Image: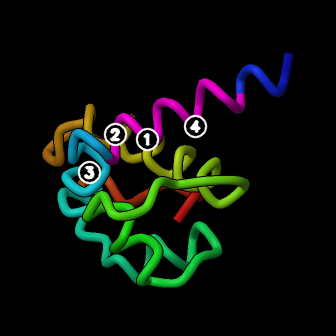
C-alpha cells in the first residue's frame, strides 16, 4: 500500500514539473533552486534539470521534492495578507 502511495506522489511530482507548476510554486515562495536542492538532498543542477524538463525526478529525492511541492501548494492557498504576515515560506519542509 505504501508503495502505491509513493508511485502516486511520484506521478504528481512529475506532472507538476512537466506543467511548470513546480517552478511557479518555487518562484512564488521566493525560494532559490539551491534552497530547494538542499531541502531535497540533490545538487542545484538536478533541480534545474527537473524544471527544464531534461530530467525526471526519481527515487527518494523526488519524493522529498513532492513533499516540498505539496507544502508550497498549501502555503500558496493562504493569501500573503492573511495570518501573521509571514507569507508562504513558513513550512518546516524548507
- Contact, CB < 8 Å: mark 1 with mark 3? no
Q: From what the image shows, is residue 36 above or below residue 68?
A: below
Residue sitting at x 38%, y 62% = 50
Residue 14 is tagged as 1
Instruction: Provide residue 53's location: percent of width, then percent of height.
Output: 30, 58
Gap between marks 1 and 3 measured at Cα: 14 Å
Residue 77 is tagged as none
Rendered image quadrant of residue 6:
top right
For the magenta stretch, what is the residue range?
6-17
Q: Residues within 10 Å of mark 2 (few under 14, many from 20)?
A: some
Rendered image quadrant of residue 41:
bottom right
Discs 3/4, front: 4
Q: Which residue is mark 2?
A: 16
Instruction: Provide residue 46's location: percent of width, then percent of height.
Output: 47, 75
Q: Earlier in the sequence, mark 2 or mark 4?
A: 4
Q: Which residue is mark 4?
A: 10
- Contact, CB < 8 Å: mark 3 with mark 2? yes
Q: Which residue is mark 3?
A: 25
52 or 80, nearer to the observer: 52
Seen as rendered, the residue at the extreme right is 1
Q: Is residue 25 visible?
A: yes
Amino acid at each position: 500500500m505504501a508503495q502505491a502511495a509513493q508511485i502516486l506522489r511520484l506521478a504528481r511530482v512529475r506532472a507538476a514539473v512537466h506543467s511548470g507548476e513546480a517552478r511557479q510554486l518555487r518562484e512564488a515562495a521566493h525560494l532559490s533552486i539551491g534552497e530547494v536542492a538542499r531541502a531535497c538532498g540533490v545538487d542545484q543542477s538536478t533541480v534545474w534539470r527537473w524544471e527544464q524538463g531534461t530530467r525526471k525526478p526519481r527515487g527518494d529525492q523526488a519524493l522529498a521534492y513532492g513533499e516540498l511541492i505539496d507544502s508550497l501548494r498549501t502555503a500558496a492557498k493562504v493569501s500573503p495578507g492573511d495570518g501573521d504576515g509571514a507569507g508562504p515560506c513558513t513550512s518546516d519542509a524548507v
